Amino acid sequence: MNQTILPLELDACLDPDHIVFSIYEFVDSLENYYFEIFETQDGRPAYHPKPLIMSLLYAYSEGVFSGRKIEKMMKENLPMQWLVGQQVISYRTINRFRSSDKCSTLLENIFIEFTIKLKLERLVTLDNYFIDGTKIEANANKYSFVWKKATERYSARLKETARKYYFEEIQPMVDAGIQYDEELELDELMLQEITELVEEEINRLNDEIEQYPVKGPDVRKQKRRRLKKHHRKVSKDFLARTQKYKKQFETFDGRNSYSRTDTDATFMRMKDDHMMNGQLKAGYNIQAATENQFVLDYNIYPNPTDTRTLKPFIESFHHLPKRIVADAGYGSEENLTYLNENGIEHLIKYNRFDKDQKKKHKESDKNLDNWKHRVRENTFTHPDGTIYYYSYQSNRKNKSGYTQKVRVYKPKDPDNAPQKALYYNEYYQQLKKIETEKLLSEEGSAIYGQRQIDVEPVFGQIKAILGYTRCNLRGKQKVKTDVGLVLMANNLRKYTKRRKIK
């Protein structure tokens, strides 16, 4: 151990197929204009962004996400030392870099360039995008929840309490009281007016007491004390809580909950173990589009279900593929309509597709194919002979504003009928038939079968192999960068293995 030796080049100590060579080769090949956004004339000379992004990609590929541990790798890890040129960058610099908007922009360009690289090397064709989603726990306290229903209940109760308090306690004591409708709910603006009104009355009493002092007990001073009490109640309690609830409603932004620790995260049920015994935790819904197990596009959303993510996800694509392939979580009428209207070829199961293919359903009286539909009479006949007559049309609007047109049919004697009503969505039935024909065809079945071995393993790899089960940053944009780093690190792991095999 104490013998004198000559230092060797670090790359001589590394496996020629080590991932750091793939990371260096790819990042170093990027055009310089991608890094111009980091240039600044202020402060001390900055680190070049190349070693910073390289160090993050390598650390994430090894399942290391902590800034302090990444700094430690620069001191002790031989591949990391080679990658960053034996620099030791402070964990503060690393954390500030990956939390910046500039890093987010750089990462988007990295995904575009990596997709082009895969295309040129014929590792992807960009024909089929396999889409799926998974939930990742946010970097937030699990008991920091704020529920929309609770906020609505408390807000309504506060308005009622504030209204009664004004009419019973304040208005009788103020000569120039504001004449509100007794049924009107006091909002933030009205409470501010009441606060100013009470202040004016207190100032008037102060002037009157100073100008016309009275020996002994003074009724005006008693009134002033009560008014000060009312002023504190309105300004510190009613007005403060009203502003608090207003801010909470703005934060919800169409969601039913959020976390106080990370307001962009929504509480959703997580699958904590293989028995599906989960609990509500603050998290994000990660959407990924893959081909050949490479993630080519990704995004994050605060809503727990996949149904409402397909349209915004497709609109965020850097490249629109020939075909979209997704599971039943995306097969809503709204999504299928959107894809058809925009001419996007797709293979997507609807919600009950698998059950509809079973013998039990095909022979069931719940299968509309076993009913007789008379178009002229506008009736449906149950397999047992019961006739259902058209009653009315129900227009159901969902949260995104899409309206489903459902026709309702009822029999003459609902109490003795096999079912009291029949709900028939003709347009959606047509869409499902088209999807069924495509999915059951030889080509469609082969392509859809590829989905399970293409996109789903990616989530298993980042969670089980890389250990990415919880976000490291807070805020939607920063979490998107965090997720992008781990997905790109996983891409580079796969690329290195594929190149080695090749």
Image (spheres, rainbow, N blue to C red):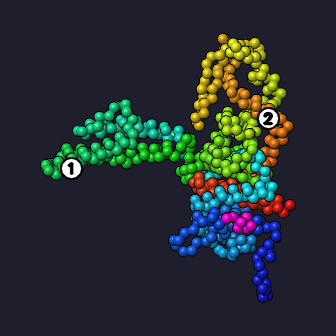
x, y percent for residue 181: 33, 31
x, y percent for residue 263: 55, 50
Q: Residue at x 18, y 46 (%)?
A: 218
Q: Give the number of the mark in front: 2 or 1.
A: 2
In-front residue for pair 177/380? 380
Is 144 left, or right, of 316 in this rendering?
Answer: left
Q: Does the stretch in magenta take in 25?
A: yes
The span shown in magenta is 24-31
Relative to 188, is 409 above or below? above
The C terminus sits in image quarter: bottom right
Three-letter amino acid code of the residue under disc 2? Lys
Q: Which residue is mark 2?
A: 438
Q: Residue at x 69, y 75 (%)?
A: 85
Three-letter amino acid code of the residue under disc 1? Asn
Q: Secondary structure at mark 1?
A: helix
Dot 2 or dot 1, earlier in sequence:
1
In-front residue for pair 247/217? 247
Q: Which mark is residue 188?
A: none
Q: Which residue is mark 1?
A: 206
Q: Residue at x 62, y 52 (%)?
A: 138
Do the numbered discs 2 and 1 sit on residues whose CB atoms are within 8 Å?
no
The single residue placed furthest to the top in the displayed view is: 412
* Mark 2 crowd level (few <14, some 14–19, many ≥20, 10 Å Cα): some
x, y percent for residue 58: 71, 65
Mark 2 and mark 1: span between their CA atoms?
A: 83 Å
Q: Quadrant of residue 278?
A: top right
The N terminus sits in image quarter: bottom right
